[in-house]
Image: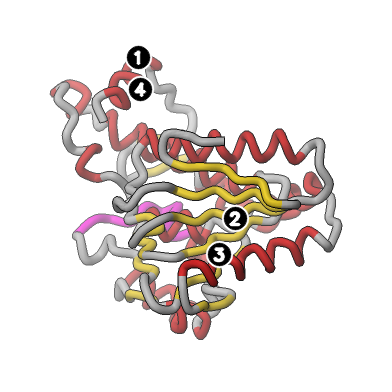
Amino acid sequence: MEGDMCTLEKRDGLFIITITGNDEHRLNPILIDSIRAALRRAKIESESMGPTALITTAHGKFFSNGYDLSWAASDPNPVQAQAQVRPKLMSKKFRCLVSDLISLPMPTIAAVTGHASAAGFVLALSHDYIVMRNDRGFLYMSELDIRMKIPSWFVQTVRSKIASPKVWREVVLKAAKITASMGVEWGIVDSAHDSAEETVEAAARLGMELVKRNWDGKAYAENRKTVFADVMAALSSDETVGSYGDTDFNDGIGVGAISRL
């Protein structure tokens, strides 16, 4: 299956989502919708298969350089700009994507072959495992350096995946640029590899090891949701844009905003 901005490949018991192109893979509504569509397709197809696993990776220099802040700030409609329609829409869609990953009935692996910054780092952390390329890229929570407040749900996601307070202090309050070897040492990254190709192949090997465990996908998803119940609860709101879980976006506004991307 090919989407506007990503592809979905099926290899044995693996689904591989690849974010395509050589840009920064900024998380705007079109890219988020494309990834969510691939996840829905994988979920549907997995129902007629045995155990499966999912890998997410990307072409080029970036895994994802975070939110598309330029798009969010460039709404030509002054009323929508004042109401922060674009930031709210982007946040809501990304929170839905993270919820989709936590609820997906199969193990998930992020094969990080380039930079993963801010929301891009959170996207990687939303997978069960991270494997990373040694020779290029870093994990980076950039909010402090770009003078932005980090959303509370980002911090909850970081804390759910990083046990040491010293490490998440480095990540959030010192904006550390984490290489693959640092990530392994700090317990964030599961393994480091010498090239993009080796990173994806390592993810595939890990994925097949997990598939061979013959777990029930629905039980796996329910257990994951239990483990990350605090993250799931935190996804209901984003205080940085005033977007809450019960906020309904007008369909016309959403479509119009996306059409001007």
Query: Please, what secondary structure does the residue beneath circle 1 have?
Result: helix
Cα distance, mark 4 to mark 2? 29 Å
Q: Residue at x 51, y 67 (%)?
A: 197
Which stretch did the figure color magenta?
147-156
| Disc 4 target residue | 254
Of the two numbered discs 4 and 3 in the rendering, the one whose residue sits closer to the viewer? 3
Query: Please, what secondary structure does the residue beneath circle 3 have?
Result: helix
Q: Residue at x 31, y 40 (%)?
A: 241
Q: Of the residues shown, which amino acid type is indicated by label 1?
A: Gly
| Disc 1 target residue | 252
Q: Are marks 3 and 2 in contact (CB under 8 Å)?
A: yes
| Disc 3 target residue | 200
Cα distance, mark 3 to mark 1? 39 Å
Cα distance, mark 4 to mark 3? 35 Å
Specify the label residue 55 is tagged with.
Answer: 2
Q: Nearer the viewer, residue 82 or 70?
A: 70
Of the two numbered discs 1 and 2 in the rendering, the one whose residue sits closer to the viewer? 2
In the rendered image, residue 133, in percent from the top left (x then y), is placed at 46, 73
N-terminal label among 3 and 1: 3
Query: Please, what secondary structure does the residue beneath circle 2 have?
Result: strand
- Count the labels in the image: 4
Cα distance, mark 3 to mark 2? 8 Å
**How busy is the neighbourhood of tag 1: few (under 14 within 10 Å), some, or many (20 plus)?**
few
**How busy is the neighbourhood of tag 3: few (under 14 within 10 Å), some, or many (20 plus)?**
many
